[in-house]
Image (tube, rainbow, N blue to C red):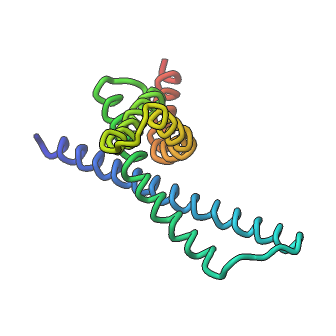
Amino acid sequence: MNKTQVFIATLRAGSFCARHFLALTITVATACAVWTVFYFALLFVALLTGSGVGGLLTYPIGLILIFFSTTVISLILLFPSTASAEWFARWRGFPILAQIPLSLVAMALLCLLTVGIPSVFSPESTFYSFLLGFGFLFLVLLVPLGFYWWVAQSLPLVLSIFRSLLKLLRR
């Protein structure tokens, strides 16, 4: 590889890492913000109805749980789904938007593994509970996956649209 190829490969790798780190950070921050809004909305309803406001540790413990669970889910399910779709689409020469269904397929496979592996080792597990667990996990992660994907791929998508417009203008 010559110096230009090394530079381009380094730039691509750096861009990949920066985009996915940004997507992880924004996904976790958004989940924490949603928890905060939800908590204070419930607190407001409790004050209006004269109900108990709960314990002092409810908000911070909930925030810590949301932070860690969102981080783990993003690293174990969302990142591999979007990264594998990005790699496959680039390898096959697909457009950027083709990564969306590829990410869904990759996440479905990861959800199958996530629910399936414990089901195999659990004697009480049934096929119904496996399907229920898979369906619940997959459906719950659809919005976070879409959010993560759009954050991670917004810059390449804008650049792709810009290149397409330049090609049209040159004709």
Left or right, 164 with reference to 54: left
Along the viewing direction, whichever of 100 and 106 lies nearer the viewer: 106
Residue at (63, 63) in percent of width and height: 35
Q: Quadrant of the N terminus?
A: top left
Tell me the quarter of the picture where residue 87 sits.
Answer: top left
Image position, residue 143 (x, y; %)? 57, 43
Along the viewing direction, whichever of 99 and 144 lies nearer the viewer: 144
Where is 4 relative to 74, above or below? Answer: above
Judged from this view, the residue extending furthest toward the left is 1
Image position, residue 164 (x, y; %)? 48, 27
Left or right, 13 with reference to 62: left
Left or right, 143 with reference to 130: right
Judged from this view, the residue extending furthest toward the bottom is 56
Along the viewing direction, whichever of 49 and 96 lies nearer the viewer: 49
Along the viewing direction, whichever of 103 and 97 lies nearer the viewer: 103
Residue at (45, 64) in percent of width and height: 68
Image position, residue 60 (x, y; %)? 58, 76
Image position, residue 50 (x, y; %)? 88, 74
